[in-house]
Structures are given as C-alpha cells and as structure tokens.
Image: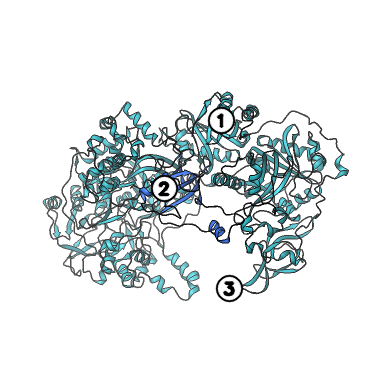
Amino acid sequence: MLTLRCPYCGAMCDETELSPGGEAHLKRRGPGSSDGDFEEYLFMRENPMGVHFERWRHAMGCGKWFHAARCASTNEVFGTYAAQTTEPPKEIREAVSHGRPGWIWRNFR
Amino acid sequence: MSGRLARGGRLIDRSKRLEFSFNGHPMSGFAGDTLASALLANGRTLVGRSFKYHRPRGIVASGPEEPNALLGLGDGADFEPNQRATTTELTAGMEARSQNHWPSLEFDVGGINSALSKLLTAGFYYKMFIHPRPFWKHVYEPLIRRAAGLGAAPKAPDASRYEHFHAHVDVLVVGGGVAGLMAARSAAARGATVMVIEQTAHWGGRASVDGGVIDGDPPEAWVERTVAELSGMPNARMRVRCMGAGVYDHGYALACETVADHVRTEAPRHRLWKIRARRIIVATGAIERPLVFAGNDLPGVMLASAVRDYAVNWGVSAGDRTVVVANNDDAYRTALTLKDVGMEVAAVIDVRSGAEGPLPVAAREKGIPVHVGRAVAEAKGRGKVERVAVCGTAGDGSALDEIACDVVAMSGGWSPAAHLWSHCGGRLAWDEEAACFRPDAAKPPTGADGKGFVLAAGAANGEGLLASALADGAEAGNAASGDVPGGNNGEVGSTGLAPRRNESAAEYSGATSGGAPGSSGSEYRNDPGGDVRGGEGAEDGNAESGPRDGGGPSGTGAGNAANDVFGGGGGAAGHGGDESRGSLGPPEAEAPEEKAARPIWIMPEGAKRSLREKAWLDYQNDVKVSDVQLAAREGYDAVEHAKRYTTLGMATDQGKLGNVNGLAVLSLASGRSIPRTGTTTFRPPYAPISMGSIAGEARGGTFQPIRRTPMHDWHGANGADWEPVGQWRRPYAYVRPGESVGDAVAREVSGVREKVGILDASTLGKIVVKGEDAGRFLDMLYTNKMSSLKVGRCRYGLMCTENGFLFDDGVVARTGEDEFLCHTTSGGADRVHAHMEEWLQTEWWDWKVWVVNATEQFAQIAVAGPDAGEVLRNLGGMDVSEEALPFMAWADGQLAGIPVRVFRISFSGELSYEIAVKANMGRALWDACLAAGGEFGIAPYGTEALHVLRAEKGFIMIGDETDGTVIPQDLGLDWAVSKKKDDFLGKRAQERPWMRDGSRWRLVGLETVDGSVLPDGAHAVGEGWNANGQRHMIGRVTSTYHSPTLGRGIALGLVERGPERMGETLEFPKVKGGSVKAKIVPPTFFDPEGEKQIVRPERAGRTPPSRKPEGATPGVAVALRGEVYEGLCAVRDLGPVGMVAVRGDLSEGALAEAAAELTGVDFPGPLRCGFSGRAGLAWMSPDELLVIVDYAGAADAVKKLRGALKDKHALVLDMSDARSMISLEGEAARDVLAKLTPADVSPGALPVGAFRRSRLAQAPAGFWMREAGVAEVVVFRSVSRYAFDVLRLAAHPEGSVGHHA
C-alpha cells in the first residue's frame, strides 16, 4: 500500500486514492510509424527490478496525472513530478542517482 | 485436575460470576477470565481433537499461539468457528463447543486415525490417493475433508457490525508490555504522535507475571504509572484489545480491535484499524517454545509460561502435581510461582548439566527437586498426562525413572515474535547464544524514504530480560521519534508546494507545551536542534542519523543492535548525545540474572524412532519429528518444501509454537545449520482476523455504492426489475401485476413501436468539452470528424483505444463555437472522462481544452414512439416539429415550464426526443411527461426493451457487439471512420495487416430458421477441426432477443467474412446437445430505410404547438431531501446548494475578483477553502475552483463568472444538481470521517480552512471542517444515498472511538 505525494495539489495520497497508469515517458507513434516503432510504443514495457518511472493519476482527488520514480523491488520513492514532460527531470534523476548509483532505465541514467 | 485456586488472580473479579457452557455443560467463571482460564478453572483439560489423527488435545498456551483450544462460539447468526479460547474473553452466557470429533469429544471415532498414524505420515495423501485419477475429486477429497478439519462454516449470515478506522501517527507501537510502553513514552515525550496498541485487555505484558523491580516497585506499579502518564498526553493514543495484524509498505499497518465480541449489542464487533505510521515499533514480545518429546501433545502438557500465567493472572491451577521440563532458568519461575500458590511441584527436569543461576537456587531452597542433565523420554497417560518417564539428555530415551504428575510445564526457550518485523521484508538473524531468530537490525523493512521504518524492541528484539527490555524500548522510542522525516517524497521533484507534513505532531506537541504532563518532554521541546516535527531538517544528514547513531556499527552489542536502523549505515557522525535531544532514559530495573539456555531440539537428543513418531512439532496440523525427517529423506529438505510436504506451520496458528523446532529438526536431518536452513515467510495476519472486519461497512446495502438517478424512487415504486449497469441501477423492465419479466419487455417494445414510451436515460455520460482546440481534440478522440459539426447539430461518434479497438460510442452535440457535449455509454462516462483527461494532461498538454464530466448535473428522459411529438406538444413550450427540430439536431427551450435541452436523436429507430433537464427537476419533468402522454398510452420502458429496439434496428451496443478485440470496421461502421483525417487514436493500429484482413469476423444479422431465439454467446461451427482437436469456429452470437415486433428470434453476431455470406445458413451447437440453424441476413431487421424516426406529417399539426402548461412551476427535488440522522454526531443533508465549477487559470485576477465578489471569500490556495455564511470557495485542483453560493443564485454566479472570464480560456458550469452536501455536526465528526476515508483528518492535517478530496468508503468525496466540530462533505448526487448511509453507520451511537478527542 504505497503513499505518493501528488505534485499538483500537494496531498499525500493513499494508494487507494490513486489509479495506476503504467510506464511513463512513452513516445506516441501514430500513422506513418514503422511496425517496429508502433509495436514498441504499444506493447514493449520495462520490467525492472529496481528504479522504474511510472504514471499515476490522483483519481480520488485533484484528478491530475503525475509521474513517480520508484524502486520496484523496495518501493523506495525517489520523487514524484508533473506529467507534462517527456523525460525525468534533472532533480529526479539526481535523486535516483543518490539512492541507486549507476542506475539505467531505458536510455536514461 | 485443574481448578480455581482459593486466592489470587490479578485479572479476575471474584465478585462477578459469569455463567457459560461448554458442549452444553453449564460452567461458571469470573469477569476477567479468558475462556481458556475459565475452562481450566472448571476442571476442563481436554478441549478438542486434533486435525488429522483426532488425538485428544488440551490447552497448551495462554495467548494467540494456542494451537489446540479452538472452539465454536455462539449460535445461528452469531456462530463463529475456530475461536481461540486463550484470547477470547469470557462473557456471560457464552456457548462454547469443541470441534472435529464424532460422536463426542470424549469418544471420537476418528481417533482410529491415531492408531493408524504409522500409515498416515507426511505426504501420505499425495502418495496414497493419486490413483485412479478421477477418485481424488469425487471420492478421496470429499472423504478426507469430512474426516479432517476444524470448525464447521457458519450457515447464517453474520449478524454483527464491523467498521474501519484510519489513523495517521508518527510512531505506532505494537505491544503494550513494558518495552512497548517504554518505547511509546519515549517517543511521545519527544513530541511525536504515538499510538500504542495491545492485543490483550491489559497493559504490561509478561512483566507483571514474571516479576522484578522497576524504579523500586513491582512492574505492575510502573506499568500503571506509565499508562496513566501516556493517557494524559495529548499526542499519545492507547488502545487495548487491538492486535497488530500486519505491516505493509510505506508504514501501513493493520490492527484488529475487539470492541464488543460475543455480546449482543449494536456496537461494532470488530474495528479494523488502518494505520499509517512513519515508524512502527514492534514490541510484540516472545513466544515460548515447546520441548519436543514423545507424548508432548497429551492434555496436561503445557508451556511453562502458560502454567504460571494461569496461576498469577486468573488464579487457576493447571493441575495438582506439576513437573517442569526446561532448558533454561526462566522456567524455574513457574516452579517458584506454583510453590508460592501452594501447588505441588514434583520436580524440575533440566537438560543442562548444571543449574546454578539465582532462580534454580531459589527453587532448590524452596525444596523443589531439581534434576539436571535429565530429559523427558515420554509423557504417558490415557487421554491426559499421568506420569513422565525421565531419561538422560543425550541417549535414546531409555527410561531411568518415572514421575507421577498431571501437568508437564515445558520450556524450550523463547522465540522473539518477529512476525510484524518480517511482514514487509525485515530479515532475521540466528542468534546462536540465545538459540533464536531475532530481527537483524541491519536489514529492516524499508519505506518510501529508503530507510528502515520498523524497529523491534524488547523481547521481540531478543531482549527479554526486564532491564534490557526497558532499555531497548526506550532506545526504540527515541530512535523512532528522532527520525520522523515527515513525508516520504515531498522533498524531491514536487511543485514546491510547502509539504504539509506532520502537522498533526505539530499540533499535538503544541498542545502539550500548554500543560505538559511530562517534564522531559517540555525540556526536549526547548532544544532547537531536536525538532522531531520538522520535515525541514530531514534532508540534513544529521537529522537523518537520529539519536541512536551514537552506538557502533550495526549488529554490535545486543542491546544496541537496532541502533543503526536509521543511522545511515553506521558511518554517520554522531551529534550530541541522547540527552541533548531530550531522550527519555529507561527506569532502573532489576530481575534475577538468567544463565545461558541449552538448545535441545529433540528430547532426548538420540530419541529412538518409536519416540520420534510420538513427538509433536505442530499440534494443530499433527506434524511429528518423524514427518519432518521423512520429508528431508525424500528430498523435501528446503524449508519451504518441507513446510508444504508436511504442512508444518500451515495451520491457523501459523506455526507460532512449532516452526523453530521444526526447522531445527529439518536442519539436523539435512545436515545444514539452522541459519542456512532459514525460516519460512511470515505473512499477515499475525493471528486470524474476522472476515467481517475486512469488509467493514461494505456489506448489505452498502456493499458498494449504488448510483441512483433522480427518478430512481419512481422506478422502484412502479415495478422496476433492476439491472446493474456499472454502479447504476436501471430498470430492466417495469413488471405489472400478473406479468412475467418477458411479458413486460414485449409489452414495452410494442408500446414504443406502436404508441410512445418513456425511458430514464439519465445514466448516459455527458461530458462538456470546451476550448479553442476542442474540435481538434475530438477529431483525435473520435474516429470520425467532429470539428466539422455545426452548432445546433448532433453526430454519432466512435472512440477507439490506441490499439484500434472500439471502446465507447455516443452522440456528440456541438453546443457552441468552441464547445461540445459528448454523450457516452452509461457505464462509460467515468472511463471516457478519464481517457480525455489522460490525453489532455499527458500528451497534448499545450492544447486549449477543458473537460468537465457533467453527467450528474442533468437527468435525461427519452420520449420515443410514433406519438412522441404529441407528448412534447402536450407538455408545451417548444416547437418540436420536423422543421424546427430535425433529426440529429438539438434545441434549448422550456417544456411544461421547465428549462430543457431537447435532442432529436434515436436509439430505437422511432421518432425520439431525448430531453435533458437539471437533475433536481428530473422527477418533475418525468411526472409531467407521464401526465402529458396519458392520452397516448405512454408507458415507461426499461433497458431490455431498449436493447430489443436497438437490435431490431441493428444498432450495436458497446459490451455486446464489442469485447475489446473488435474494431469499428468489423461492425460495418466504416462510414463513421474518417479516411480524411491524418490521425486519430486507433488509426495507426487499424492499419495493421490483421485489422484489414478480409477473414475477420464481421457483424451480420442472424435469423433462426425455426424462429427460436439463439442462445447468447453461441458459436457457429464450420468445416473441419483445429489444432486442438476442436470444431472450427467461424462466428458467434453477440446479441440475441425475441423480437415482439417481428414475432421471431433475432440476433446479431460476428461471423467470419460475414457480410460476404448473406443467405448462408450456419449451425450453432447448444451447450446440452443439439444445434440451432440460423440464416445470415443484414443486421437491420426493422425499418431499414429509417422512415419511422421522422415526424409523421399527418400528425404534425394535430395539436397546437407551444401550448403553455397550466399550474405552477414544479419544485426542486434534491436527492436526500434534508434527511438527518442523530448519532455520534448529527449527519445532515444540507439540501440544495449552488455549486459552480470553474476550470481555468486560477491565477487569473478577474476570476479571483469575481469569485470574491460573489462569495465574500479570499481566493483559496492549494488544498484550502474559505466560507462566508453559506457562500464559499474551494480549491479543487490547480485549474479548478468550486464556487459555493445559494442554490437560487447559481445561475447568476455562472453568468458573472462567465462574464469575468469572457475572453479567457475557461469553462464555467453550474454543477449544483450534480452534487449533494452533507454536514457532520458534533465532536465526533473527525472520527466519523476517519472511519471512511484514508485521508488524514486529524486537526493538524485538516484544520478549519483546509479542503481535501479523497474517498468516502468507495465513493469520491470532498470535505472540510466548517468550524471545530462541524465537517462538511460533498459527494456526487447519484451516490448521496450511499454516502449518507455509510456516514450513518459510522456515526452509530455505539461506535464511539475517541481517537480525535
């Protein structure tokens, strides 16, 4: 039963107030994309035993989608941040580096 | 035989006699007794039969570790099986029954299993009952199930009430023994909010029984003082009869409180606490281990600690003549205690070669014979212990002597109760010296901040001696409160909003300084370096280190083993001493020194086979030493394998007594050390909790929210046969007296086709989409083009997922140049709304679009049938002619004096008007329609008639024709999929080869050759067989009905190359043999030209248009009509309230100005609200404001706000009818809320002026404290009945909690 702080309203949320949204920072592939890219976008997902970047929605609250950097094996939370970004912001990456030196997730490190 | 002593019993009140019965025999006990102590007091030693061998079993223990004394309690709706006599408090009139025997407890036929025990070894079932295969399911398993097992399942529904309570504290202390109390006091003195829970009804744990001196007094006196002190602290909460059941991620803990067990009362029987704690201190004590000798399961063989518990706590002797068998000094306390109360101790048998500690010396001085270097070869007797055979410690068990006795008090040492430490990943380390697994302080369970959040203290941490337990508790309390980081991830990457962390502590400690009961606490608060409340210091390394890092690196020194749990790996520099942080040191304590124990896992160590086959490890599941040894021999020598092969530790006691002995035996058998053998996983709950407590209020009428439309009550009163649609309840049909449901559906269909029908369509989703990019946005969401729709017109649209599959459909109306109203399916409104928000927030966040789910603001009524136009004309007020309101157009106006929006859309193929009206006027319009349609024979129709009508027209239904694998093209809806648009959600996916493959199953109509109705879901079979040897499937039925219009069965289905096979006949096998033949036809069965949905000219002029209605304007009807419930607090529906939703840039000055003018309230910041009289403002989200005004003033407020935001990107909507407001008035308001919401509602977290959106049980809600003692709650209109009901249950006068008192 996780708790995450919604970066929009600032509320500390119980997991039951949130709905999960899967992996963060997917790049949408639309018409004209190659089969490989489209498959990647639609189906291929990370499944790390370690740092993961994921989407949550503060569904029973302000309704905002946000991102969380969380260790999938210990549930350590390195931070939550706004959804309006295509990659983890610098301070989040630094926080992750602080807790998990040498981490790699997709192309981010 | 066992019985009540003439004197003593610190927990019983001999002046209060309680009558009860066991297996029908009347017995009596005293107030304060447990059922177990009362049974022993009545001479009852035999209390049950074992699971597998049906061996006679007696009470072994005095706490939750008891494996044998599981009884059935109560009767009928109050019956509950498998209740532990040792943890059940005796109540007057209690009816207890023993289990698992036939015909009686004393003579059990199943006892033959015991004689056959040589055959019934571990793995016996698996080996024996494997052939012939079908016999397992039909013969063996049913027989075994009947023979083995515990109590019978109750037959009647549980009559008791249950509830939840959400608590948020800095430090949760589980266990109210001296270590737990010490930890709680230390943490509380430092200003942390502390909750300490104790599973029994009494504080102090074992110390009061085991004795010693604390601060010059007996432990009991110190316990009393400390409890009084804690009770007086505003930041401490104490709760007895509250068992810590489980520890989960991020400081979440479950505890089950027994409020009113086994008594008839309106109070909740159990209360499940859902606790969020920043740190959890596990001070759960230790559990004594049995010794493993032959006959150790005979009634009369008990734990040594239990024997003295019964004597000291309840004044009960377990028997007349006791032999103590031990490997340690502690067990001598039992001998001494028994001697003190005048009972005979025949001997102490000690496996050690010498016993020279103070306790053995005292025993000898009292004349108790002590035999060292000796063991018990076997306990003997028929149905109970009569004597023990004594042997050497190491030999094969040849008896040297026999001693007569009727009690054997055994002690094999103590195992720390580390369950809660382990639940969330805390590791254990084998302590060779103490011969036990104890929490490994270097590997605690870690929380959101990556640091350990559980600390073990006292005996649970392996510190069982009085002084060390107190010291350990004090350290744990200091450490837990010294590193209260406040919030787990608020520091990083958030929006810079001031984290509202730990305000509750701030408030509590602030209150403390006013009249602080603990001087050390106030002293501490003067120290600026010791701000336990502050998150501010949490990023500072020193602050993180906590006061316990003065000690060495982790794992050194037993007493300090937990020091570095939060110490940053031991490398962090210490800062100051404990004293400078205001730590509370432990009191002076003394207890007799105890010499080292000598582990002995099988007694005697060389026990011969005949003894090992009678030496029990797990009493409840009947696992013996020989079984574990057999498992090891057969290759199941991994601990998790051995557990499952033998069922060791898999009973309801979860191996509390037997596990360590079992794995030690496994370790001996496999030749691996105990730490290498390891333990099985500890899983919650610590001890069984009731299913009712897990359900809480979620049962019966409040099992889940039932959403009700404004016309719900009318439907109920008019024969509605309900159908669940999502959480909505919709009338399936309105059944009249004498009709079957099928008759009613047929009548309703014909009524619509021939006359006119009326449908409550309020559940249809209604989502307002507004902004300059709204058209562009809808073009991406729908497969067809919406941006080209003209204002005033409607268009049917399809929505697909990115995978290309159809997931919702509905009619979109363009309501303005930059505004659309999107109708969704009934079950789909929330999903579609969330889908829209997701794409707007996470992909196209620069598009200027606002979305509001206005579903509940409007009731919607469909009037359909040839006479629909007449009905509207009778209502009067609007021109609804073909010219004024053509098909697929909408218009605003009035009907019967009620403001409405009328859509000319049809889901039935008939002339149809869907009339949207404010929800609070929905019922009034419904009644008006029925009155206006009376002359045409208007009748309501339900969802089934709706489905038949649409199927006759070949209209698809989401969820029938679609199942998440169907694309619009499969359904012949290519016309609604734009080929011109560059992109829309699902377009790329629909370009994949398989989506364009001609052999996909596609929509057709199916007409049975014999006119019958095809079975729903039936598959059509084609030629040949597939790779699995099954018939080749070529299609399936998706919708199937009897069409009253056509007088035959009709169906829609998906068939391979369907549209190319018109006229072919397919075969659909039935489940129970036979098959149905059906012909492939076009899916539109009725009126394929669509002529019926046109206004018939010959009727157009029959009644004058725009007739003004007579009489006054009908009144507003809110959902709850001002209902009030007086309980712990008053629960009051506040009636109609004006609520205007504003979506836009909240920093817009014009908005703040207009809002302030309307309400007289300053613009609120995040998570804040403000009120002035009934008017107020609440911050809903970074781009949503709720403006609260008079109900009558809502329209004016909308006008003013729209005016203020005229040229801005904003959406202002009257949502007054979509919501209900309920107030909770009284001191218990916070407690009542806390029973239902996981949000922190303590005064620190939810002060007056704070606003929180969360959930109320299972429904979304917003709430705030209007003033001290008055909370207000806003919920959606449709769930207001549910919300009121769960609040009423929570406010039940018998359910007082006092947590926020």
Shade representing chain B: cyan
Q: Which chain is blue?
A: A
Whether the residues at callouts 2 and 1 have beta carbons within 8 Å, the answer is: no
Q: Nearer the viewer, residue B176 or A47?
A: A47
Q: What is the C-alpha distance between the residues marked 2 and 1? A: 33 Å
Residue B1122 in which image quadrant: top right
Taking the spot 38% from the left edge, 71% from the top edge, the residue there is B124
Q: Identify which amino acid the numbered label 3 is placed on.
A: Asn
Q: Residue at x 63, y 45 (%)?
A: B777
Please say whether residue B658 is visible from this viewpoint: no
Marks 3/1: CA distance?
66 Å
Tell me the crowding category of disc 3: few under 14, some 14 to 19, or many 20 or more residues within 10 angstroms, Cα based: few
Amino acid type, residue under disc 2 in the picture: Arg
N-terminal of the two: label 3 or label 1?
A: 3
Residue kind at label 1, given as amino acid type: Glu
Q: Where B256 sits versus B1154, above or below? A: below
Nearest-to-viewer mark from 3 and 2 = 2
- Viewed as shown, does residue B806 lie left or right of B271? right
Colouring convention used in this rendered image of the protein: by chain
- Tell me where residue B1014 appears, x and y as whole percent: 71, 63
Residue B528: percent from left, percent from top:
29, 31
| Residue under numbered circle 2 | A93
Secondary element under disc 1, as helix, strand or loop, is loop
Instruction: Return the mark for residue B673.
Output: none
Residue at figure coordinates x 56%, y 43% from the top left: B845
Chain part drawn in magenta: B1102-1115
Judged by depth in the image, the label closer to the viewer, 3 or 1, is 1
Residue position marked by numbered label 1 in the rendering: B1148
